[in-house]
Amino acid sequence: MTSTFPDISISTDRLVLRPFEAGDIPPLAEMMNDELVTAWTSAPCPYTTADARDWALRRAPSERLSGRGIVFAVAEFLTQRLVGTLHLRNTDWRTLTAEVAYVTAPWARGEGYACEAVLAAAEWLFRDQKFERLEMRTAADNTAAQQVAQKAGCVSEGVLRSAWIARSRPEGGGAGWTETRTDLIIWSLLPEDLDEAEEPRAFGGYDAYSSPGDYTSSGSSGDYSSAGGYASVFPDWR
């Protein structure tokens, strides 16, 4: 029998992590076409509305139903505006471990939303689901992602050499993208690490509830692969 996460939403003072809905498809496509998201993720480029629809309405729900993980649309609590996405993936139900990956929308950066969402998901995973370890992988050159990991209280455990492919614009400003191999930094968070993190107290912890429909707004879920900051390593798009 495959273990699965419950179909829930998680709320903080400022955010709600919930299943994606159809109304999230346009902002999801816009978010994933941002150049920094393209640079640090393996998302299709360009990222079409069809890609967003497939991720939000088919692939994201299948992550939970298959037991592989759970995908959340991250929205502002009051406005329900989509500000990112968060994915708990590579779930091991025997060792009770998972990996977190996220993308922050360009219109929501600089607000501390990524750290708030990661900590809310971690608190729920540890305290509600009794997991023992959460991992994060960030590209070595993605300082924004490393700052999120540090602020969340994660511990750097080492480097995977030449383990990721980042994308960048060609020198001279040409069209298209070039691919470059880069290292990945491995981070971990354990239940006891949350006691030392200040962010859960700052945003008041989280509330989990099993009726996502309580929030009558749009949303949709999808599956991403990334390496930190604007995206921490999401699963491959292939």
Image (cartoon, grey):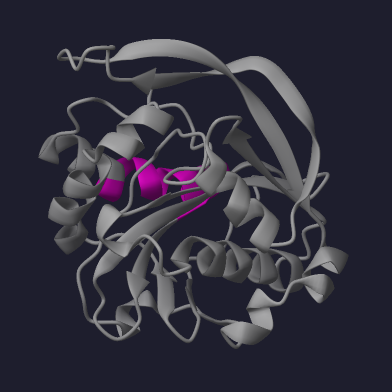
Residue 237 lies in quadrant: top left
Q: Residue at x 25, y 63 (%)?
A: 219
On the image, the x and y values in percent for residue 12 come to: 50, 82
On the image, the x and y values in percent for residue 49 come to: 12, 40
Q: Is 53 on the left or on the right of 14, as rendered?
A: left
Tell me if residue 222 can be seen: yes
Q: Nearer the viewer, residue 101 or 138?
A: 138
Q: Residue at x 70, y 16 (%)?
A: 161
Q: Residue furthest right?
A: 192
On the image, the x and y values in percent for residue 204 come to: 60, 88
Q: Is 158 on the left or on the right of 203, as rendered?
A: right
> What is the total number of numbered labels drawn onto the structure image?
0
Tell me if residue 41 can be seen: no
In reply to whether residue 63 is colored magenta, the answer given is yes
| Image quadrant containing the C terminus | top left
Residue 77 lies in quadrant: bottom left
193 lies above or below 92: below
Magenta extent: 56-71
On the image, the x and y values in percent for residue 198 come to: 71, 77
The prevailing secondary structure element of the residues shown in magenta is helix
Q: Residue at x 78, y 65 (%)?
A: 130
